[in-house]
Image: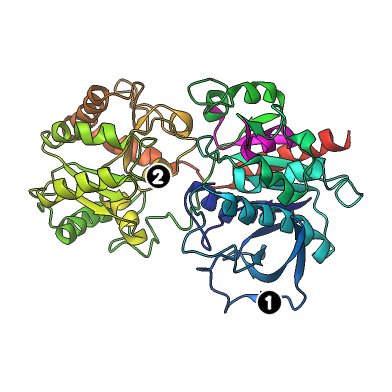
C-alpha cells in the first residue's frame, strides 16, 4: 500500500508529545512490512535545513483567495529509507515550538490549513497518489474534510483516510470565517460536521469525515465513548463506533534499551541487573540525594498539569516522602505547579528533587535509576513512560485508565504475576495507599519485586504488532472507500 502520514509532529524533527513519537516510529515499522510510506509535516523555524534536499520547484497551495508558494525539503526518518517532506513557509511556520496556543487565533488555523492542503498538493507534486492518508489529531483533520468536499476530482477518488486520536482534550475552535481559507462550502458548517457551538472545530469535522478513526489504546477507544472521557464528542464516537479501532502504541526498543542506552553511565539487561543499582547510585550523587542503595527511588517524568494528576501527586507528596523514599521529578507545565515543586525541591533534604523543564538525558537516567515510576493520570490515551519503565525494570504505579490499564498488569502477591501497581480512583488517599503497597513489596517481598521487574523487561513492546494492526485497518478503510 501507498500510505501518507500527514502530521504536525514527527520525532526527532518536531515533538511536543506522544503524537511525535508515533509519527516518528510507526512509518518505519510499516515500511519494514513492505509498504510505501511517506511523511509530510511543516518545516518549522527550528528544524535545520542543511541536511535536507531542497526540491527546486516550489509548491503552490491554494489558501483563501491566494495561492501561497511553499518550499519542499526532503529528508528521511533516521535509520530508515522512509521519506519525510517538509513544507516550508516562513510566514506561517515560525516560532520555536510546533504550536502557537493550540488554536488560539486565526493564524493557528491558517498554519495547519496550509499543511493539510499542502499535503494533497504534495501528492500531485510528486506524482504519487496514496491509497491511504493517515492524519493525526486536529492539525491535519482538515484532510478528510477536503477530500469529501473540495477535492472531488479523480486524483483522490480511491484514497481512504484514517484519523488517529492521540488526545481528545485538545480541540481548538475557530471563527466561521475560517471556512474561506479552505474554500469549504457552508454545507459542512453543520452539527454533524465542523460546527461546534457556533464555531469551527476541525477535530469534530475530521471525526465525521474520515473513512475510519483510530486511537492509541483499546481501553481509550472504549472510554472516549463515555461523557467522562469523550471531551464533548462522545456521541460522535458512538455514532462512528463501527469505524473506531483502538491500537496500542509501541515504543522504539532501540532508543529505550538499558543495554545500549547512551544516556546511562551503566548498562544492564534482564540477565545482568547490577547496572541498575549503579545507575541509582550515580543519579543520587548527581542530584545531591542521600546516597543510600536501600532507599526506594520513585521517578516521575511528566507534563505538570491537570490531565497528568500532578495536583493530586503534589497533595500526596508529604505522605509519600514520609515513607522514607526518594522522589525524583522532571517536567514542566502549569506555572503554579512548577513554583510549588521548585520550592519543595529547594528544601528536599536529600529525599526530593525536581528538575523543571525537559532534559532527554535526565529522562533516561530517571527511568534507569528508579525502582518505581509514578503516573497518576486523570486520563491517558496511551502513555509511553509506563512502557519505558517496564523496559528498564522500573515498576509503574498508575491510575487504571486508558493505555495505562492496557499496558500495566496488576501485582498479584499470591501468584507472583504483574508488572506494576494500579489504583482506580484518583484521590490523594488512593495514590498514597498504592505507593505504600509498592514500597512494602519492595522492602518485604524482594523476590516478588524482582520477578515483576524481569517480567516487565521481557515484554515485547515494539511497533511490530501495532504496524500489522494498522495495516489491517488500512485494508478495512480501503474496503469502505472502494466498496
Q: Which residue is mark 2?
A: 385
At numbered mark 2, what does the secondary structure look like: helix, strand or loop?
helix
Q: Is residue 471 magenta?
A: no
Tell me which corner region of the image, top left, top right, bottom left or bottom right, holds residue 427: top left
User: In the depicted view, which residue is nearer to us: 25 or 330?
Assistant: 330
Q: Earlier in the sequence, mark 1 or mark 2?
A: 1
Horizontal side of 166 relative to 118 (left or right) equals left
Span colored in magenta: 198-219
Farthest residue, direction right: 154
Q: Which residue is mark 1?
A: 54
Q: CA distance from mark 1 to mark 2?
A: 36 Å
Q: Residues within 10 Å of mark 2 (few under 14, many from 20)?
A: many
Horizontal side of 480 relative to 348 (left or right) equals right
Horizontal side of 352 relative to 75 (left or right) equals left
Q: Quadrant of the C terminus?
A: top right
At numbered mark 1, what does the secondary structure look like: helix, strand or loop?
strand
Q: Position of residue 156 (x, y in %)?
A: 85, 49
Horizontal side of 331 relative to 323 (left or right) equals right
Q: Residues within 10 Å of mark 1 (few under 14, many from 20)?
A: some
Q: Are marks 1 and 2 in contact (CB under 8 Å)?
A: no
| Residue under the image location 17 percent in, 34 percent down | 320
User: In the depicted view, which residue is nearer to us: 99 or 191?
Assistant: 191
Amino acid at each position: 500500500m501507498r500510505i501518507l502520514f500527514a502530521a504536525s509532529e514527527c520525532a526527532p524533527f518536531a515533538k511536543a508529545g506522544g503524537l511525535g513519537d508515533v509519527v516518528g516510529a510507526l512509518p518505519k515499522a510499516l515500511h519494514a512490512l513492505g509498504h510505501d510510506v511517506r511523511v509530510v509535516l511543516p518545516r518549522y523555524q527550528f528544524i535545520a535545513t542543511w541536511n535536507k534536499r531542497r526540491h527546486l520547484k516550489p509548491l503552490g497551495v491554494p489558501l483563501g483567495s491566494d495561492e501561497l508558494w511553499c518550499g519542499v525539503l526532503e529528508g528521511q526518518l533516521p535509520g530508515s529509507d522512509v521519506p519525510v517532506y517538509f513544507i516550508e513557509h516562513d510566514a506561517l511556520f515560525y516560532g520555536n515550538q510546533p504550536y502557537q496556543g493550540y488554536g488560539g487565533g486565526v493564524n493557528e488555523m491558517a498554519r495547519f490549513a496550509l499543511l493539510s492542503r499542502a499535503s494533497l498538493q504534495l501528492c500531485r507534486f510528486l506524482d504519487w497518489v496514496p491509497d491511504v492518508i493517515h492524519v493525526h489529531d486536529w492539525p491535519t483533520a482538515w484532510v478528510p474534510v477536503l477530500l469529501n468536499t473540495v477535492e472531488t476530482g479523480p486524483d483522490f477518488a480511491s484514497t481512504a483516510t484514517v484519523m488517529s486520536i492521540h488526545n481528545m482534550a485538545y480541540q481548538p475552535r475557530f471563527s466561521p470565517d475560517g471556512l474561506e481559507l479552505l474554500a469549504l462550502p457552508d454545507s459542512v458548517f453543520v452539527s454533524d460536521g465542523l460546527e461546534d457551538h457556533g464555531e469551527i472545530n476541525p477535530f469534530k469535522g475530521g471525526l465525521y469525515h474520515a473513512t475510519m478513526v483510530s486511537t492509541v489504546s483499546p481501553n481509550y477507544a472504549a472510554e472516549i465513548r463515555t461523557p467522562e472521557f469523550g471531551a464533548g464528542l462522545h456521541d460522535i464516537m458512538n455514532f462512528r463506533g463501527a469505524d473506531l479501532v483502538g491500537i496500542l502504541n509501541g515504543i522504539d526498543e532501540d532508543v529505550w534499551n538499558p543495554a545500549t542506552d547512551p544516556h546511562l553511565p551503566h548498562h544492564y539487561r534482564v540477565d545482568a541487573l547490577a547496572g541498575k543499582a549503579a545507575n541509582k547510585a550515580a543519579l543520587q550523587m548527581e542530584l545531591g540525594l542521600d546516597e543510600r542503595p536501600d532507599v526506594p527511588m520513585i521517578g516521575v517524568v511528566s507534563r505538570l498539569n491537570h490531565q497528568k494528576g500532578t495536583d493530586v501527586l503534589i497533595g500526596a507528596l508529604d505522605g509519600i516522602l514520609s515513607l522514607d523514599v526518594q522522589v525524583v521529578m522532571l517536567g514542566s507545565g502549569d506555572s503554579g505547579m512548577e513554583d510549588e515543586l521548585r520550592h519543595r525541591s529547594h528544601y528536599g533534604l536529600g529525599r526530593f528533587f525536581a528538575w523543571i523543564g525537559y532534559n532527554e538525558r535526565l529522562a533516561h537516567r530517571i527511568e534507569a535509576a528508579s525502582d518505581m515510576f509514578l503516573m497518576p493520570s486523570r486520563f491517558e490515551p496511551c502513555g509511553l513512560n509506563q512502557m519505558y519503565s517496564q523496559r528498564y525494570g522500573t515498576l509503574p504505579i498508575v491510575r487504571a485508565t486508558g493505555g495505562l490499564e492496557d499496558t500495566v498488569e496488576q501485582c498479584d502477591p499470591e501468584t507472583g504475576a504483574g508488572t506494576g501497581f494500579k489504583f482506580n480512583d484518583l484521590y490523594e488517599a488512593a495514590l498514597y495507599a498504592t505507593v505504600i503497597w509498592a514500597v512494602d513489596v519492595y522492602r518485604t517481598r524482594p523476590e516478588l519485586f524482582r520477578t515483576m521487574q524481569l517480567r516487565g523487561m521481557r515484554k515485547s513492546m515494539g511497533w511490530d504488532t501495532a504496524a500489522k494492526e494498522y495495516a489491517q485497518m488500512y485494508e478495512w478503510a480501503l474496503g469502505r472507500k472502494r466498496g
